[in-house]
């Protein structure tokens, strides 16, 4: 004969915890609590502070600091009745190469995985010369695994994706225009000129290499043959790049961006 054990609970579960969300994190709370700075949370089950925060809306990927009852902590402690939790966003510029209490294993450098929902932003990031792979048909689990194994920061508009346990670093895009998204991205990570523009393939993210004009002459249009002599090629997809009028237009835009 067996009996069903009651779920584990706290003896004082009627005494709620209080979670205070700082910065822009209140905007990420679930609809019924959105914009509230502080939330009373009834602690009726055993759950980590990370799980409770994500149940309320904000993904752990946008949380830069945590305090429980005035003590800095990581994501792992259980939430207890009466606890006062303060949840802080990242403070730009975000440096992913330095260990923190929440993320003791830093990344070796800046490399990004751009979700398909901000694909145009991914292209602009590559224009500047940053390593920015783009997710295409991968589901969230595959995308998270790729970010984990390749030490990439996930750039997305999808809050649910940044709740995936394998994603340590992410940036949640909240604006719509790609150029505005790029400014937000650069500010968030503290990135400024000099960049390395036009050094990566805009389609597949591979670093470009110089190629002799004679080696690709058969692939060039007549006017391109006549007016241009310097070329680069993508070793993977074999796309050819040269400094046409679009390059100068983009350089002018980058110069303007640097002064905004």
Image: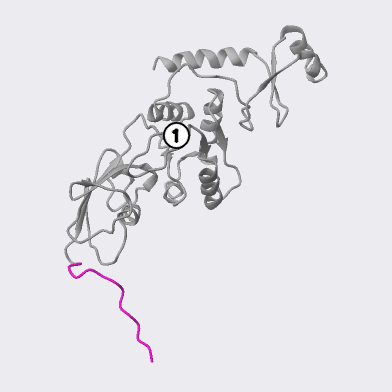
- Depth order, front residue of 75/183: 75
Q: Mark 1 points at which residue?
A: 176
The outermost residue toward the top is: 227
Specify start and end residues of the magenta stretch as a single range.
Answer: 1-13
User: Can you give x and y, in whole percent of width and height, for residue 135 in the image?
Assistant: 57, 41
Question: Residue 211, relative to residue 63: is it above or below?
Answer: above
**Placement of the C terminus among the 4 image quadrants:** top left
The outermost residue toward the right is: 218
Image position of 192 (left or right of 18) = right
Q: In which quarter of the image is residue 6?
A: bottom left
User: Can you give x and y, in whole percent of width and height, for residue 236 in the image?
Assistant: 70, 31
Question: Residue 78, relative to residue 94: is it above or below?
Answer: below
Q: State the residue at coordinates (80%, 14%).
A: 214
Q: State the residue at coordinates (29%, 48%).
A: 34
Say which element carries label 1: loop
Q: In which quarter of the image is residue 107?
A: top left
């Amino acid at each position: 004969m067996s009996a069903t054990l009651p779920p584990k609970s706290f003896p004082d579960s009627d005494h709620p915890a209080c979670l205070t969300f700082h910065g822009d994190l209140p905007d990420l709370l679930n609809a019924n609590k959105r914009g509230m700075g502080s939330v009373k949370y009834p602690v009726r089950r055993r759950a980590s502070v990370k799980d409770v925060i994500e149940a309320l809306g904000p993904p752990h990927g946008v949380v830069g600091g945590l305090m429980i009852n005035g003590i800095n902590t990581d994501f792992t402690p259980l939430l207890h009745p009466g606890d006062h939790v303060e949840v802080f966003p990242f403070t730009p510029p975000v440096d992913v190469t330095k260990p923190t209490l929440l993320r003791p294993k830093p990344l070796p450098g800046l490399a990004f995985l751009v979700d398909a929902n901000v694909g145009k932003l991914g292209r602009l990031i590559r224009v500047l010369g940053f390593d920015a792979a783009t997710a295409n048909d991968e589901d969230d689990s595959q995308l998270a695994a790729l970010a984990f194994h390749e030490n990439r920061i996930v750039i997305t508009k999808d809050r649910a994706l940044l709740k995936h346990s394998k994603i340590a670093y992410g940036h949640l895009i909240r604006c719509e225009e790609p150029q505005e998204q790029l400014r937000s991205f650069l500010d968030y990570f503290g990135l400024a000129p000099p960049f390395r523009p036009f050094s990566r393939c805009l389609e597949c993210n591979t670093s470009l290499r110089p190629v002799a004009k004679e080696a690709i002459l058969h692939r060039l249009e007549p006017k391109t043959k006549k007016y241009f002599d310097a070329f680069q090629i993508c070793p993977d997809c074999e796309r050819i790049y040269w400094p046409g009028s679009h390059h100068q237009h983009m350089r002018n835009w980058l110069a303007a961006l640097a002064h905004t």
